[in-house]
Image: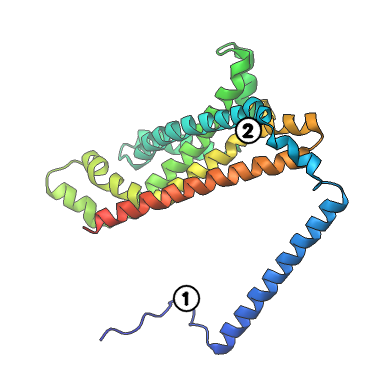
Amino acid sequence: MSAPKQSVLFDAPGPKAKRRIMLLNIVGVLVLAGLVVYLVIGLNAAGQLVPEKWNVFLKGTVWSDYLLPGLLKTLQSAAISIVTSLIFGFLFGMGRLSHNKVLNWISTVIVEFFRAVPVLLMMLFLWIMLARSGWVEAQDSPFYAVVIGLTLYNGSVIAELIRSGVHGLPRGQREAGIAIGLTRSQSLRLIEIPQALTAMLPALISQFIVILKDSALGYIINYNELLFNGKLVGTGNSNLFQSLVIVALVFIILNFALSKLAAMVSARLSSRGQK
C-alpha cells in the first residue's frame, strides 16, 4: 500500500489552521467588497456613472469608426509579433544551445541585450529612427516600431525559454538520440526542442498574452491601436474614464480567450501524449 503524499515544503494545515485560513479569506473578501462599494459610491458622486457618459458606446459609429479599427490594428501587430517572436526565439534559442562557441556567444549577447532593454524604449528609438531614416513611410513607422520592438524583446524571452526548456529535459533524451545515430543538432531539432516546446507551452502562451498587452504601448508613439482610438473617443465625448473602462474590458476578454485556447491546446497535447 502506498503511503499518502505529503508536501515537502510544509505540513498539511490542521483544523485550527483551516479555520484561520477561512477566516482570513472571508475578511479579504469583505475588504475587497468594501473597496468596490467605496469606489462605486465615489464614482457616482463624481457623476461618472450617469447613463449619458456610457450611452455613446451604444452608437454603431463609435465602434465602426474607432474601436473596431483600433482593435484590428492591435490584433494585427500582436499576431505578426507573435510569429516573428517565435522565429527569432527559435533561431537564437538554437544559437544559445549550439556547441559552436562563436555562435553561442553572439546569440547570448543578442538575447541578453534585448531582454535587458525596456520594450517601450526600443519602440521609441525605432519610431524615431525609422521616421527619420526614410526606410519606411513616416505614417507607417509606428506600426513597424511596435512590431520590431515586440519581436526583439519577446523573441529574446522565448529564446531563453527554449534554452531552459531543453536543459530541463532528462539527459536520456539526448543520449537516446545520439545512440540511434543522430547528430547533436539533429537531436535538438527532432527530439529535444519538440518536447521542450510542449513542456513550456503555458509559458509560451503567457508570453503571447504579454505581446498582446504590450501592443498598447504603441499608443505612446501614435500607433492608432485600440487604446489610442479609445482615448480619441473619450477626449471627443468628455468620457475618458468610461472609454478606458471599455478598452480594458476588451483586453480582458481577448486575454481570457487566449488563455482558454492555451488550456485547450495544452490539454489536447497532454492527452495525445498519454495514448
When asked about the image quadrant of residue 85, the answer is: top left
Please tell me whether residue 31 is drawn above or below residue 119 in the rendered image: below
Residue at 67 percent of width and 69 percent of height: 29
Q: Kindly report which numbered mark, 2 or 1, lies closer to the viewer in this rendering.
A: 2
Residue 204 percent across, percent down from the top left: 43, 46
Tell me if 37 is positioned left or right of 23 in this view.
Answer: right
Mark identifier at residue 9: 1
Tell me if 72 is positioned left or right of 188 in this view.
Answer: right
Please tell me whether residue 270 is drawn above or below residue 205 in the rendered image: below
Q: Amino acid at mark 2?
A: Leu
How many residues crowd mark 2 within 10 Å: few (<14), some (14–19), many (20+)? many
Residue lying at the far left of the rendered structure: 180
Residue at 32 percent of width and 52 percent of height: 268
- Give the camera-side residue of 51 and 218: 51
- Provide the secondary structure element on which disc 2 rests: helix
Residue 214 percent across, percent down from the top left: 59, 38
Mark identifier at residue 226: 2
Residue 124 visible, this orientation? yes
Q: CA distance from mark 2 to mark 1?
A: 44 Å
Q: Amino acid at mark 1?
A: Leu
Label 2 vs 1, first from the N-terminus: 1
Residue at 71 percent of width and 71 percent of height: 30
The quarter of the image holding the C terminus is: bottom left
Residue at 61 percent of width and 29 percent of height: 70
Please tell me whether residue 23 is drawn above or below residue 145 in the rendered image: below
